[in-house]
Amino acid sequence: MVKEGALANRCPPGGQEGVIRLTKILQHAPTNLDVTRGPERPRPVAVINPMQCIGCTLCIKACPVDAIVGAPKQLHVVIEDRCTGCDLCVPPCPVDCIDMVVQSPDLTGWNAWSPTLALQAKNHYQTRKVRILREEKDLLKRQTSKAAAKLKKLTLEKPADSKELDRKKAIIQAAMARAKEKLNAPSN
Ligand code: SF4
Ligand code: SF4
């Protein structure tokens, strides 16, 4: 919100109380929850129907707090304590086998959360971000090292067509430069 100017009224899980708190912190004018993003509601958790899950892994990729475990072509399961009820795993599921089950029938929005739950969710979100960044960097390092090996091989080749060889080398060098730039880029 601070960096990209997103509005402070687009978080249904926090409800109207969450909007009030966010607008105060951001020093925005008071506003109401934007219900086009979802209504204020009790806090749910996701539950996967074991008879229907095809193990496509799409829900794992969508979950911002690593609350789903599973492997390709295996049944996936939600870790209930981690699930924030954000719904983000529901749309990608190709067989529509994820149900959102209410956990706090009498409490909605901000009141459905405890500070402990909110802190846990924040920690899980940040841990996932760090893991994804580390995995992306590891992949870039592996790709760079493969490219370096290929470049070395090309350098040792006796070219039948030196222009073509130079073209290939330039492509690899450019890819390595881009990878280096990404590796050295500051993480947010
Ligand atoms: S509802 Fe949100 S937190 Fe819960 S499993 Fe789905 S994506 Fe993860
Ligand atoms: S998206 Fe649906 S089908 Fe795919 S692994 Fe998740 S729960 Fe199973």
Image (cartoon, rainbow, N blue to C red):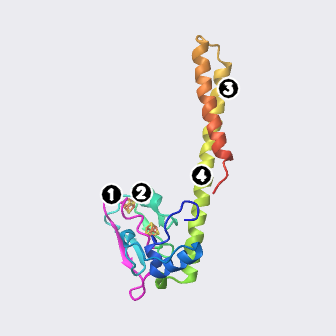
Element on which disc 3 rests: helix
Ligand 1 falls in which quarter?
bottom left
x, y (%) of residue 103? Answer: 41, 82
Q: CA distance from mark 1 to mark 3?
A: 45 Å
Task: Indicate the amino acid at tag 3.
Answer: Lys
SS assignment at label 4: helix
* Residue that sits furthest to the front in the current view: 29
**Residue 122 is inside the magenta segment:** no
Q: Does mark 2 have its CB less than 8 Å from ligand 2?
A: yes
Q: Residue 152 got which mark?
A: 3
User: Image check: 105 left or right of 1?
Assistant: left
- Which disc number belongs to residue 135? 4
Find residue 32 and report its horizontal and vertical position in percent: 43, 77
Disc 2, disc 1: CB below 8 Å? yes
Whether the residue carrying mark 4 lies under 8 Å from ligand 1 is answered with: no
Q: Which residues are magenta?
A: 85-109
Mark 4 vs mark 1, CA separation in Å: 26 Å
Within 10 angstroms of label 2, few (less than 14), some, or many (20 or more) residues? some
Is residue 92 inside the magenta stretch? yes
Whether ligand 2 has any atom under 8 Å from the Cβ at mark 3 is answered as no
Our reading of the magenta stretch's main secondary structure is loop
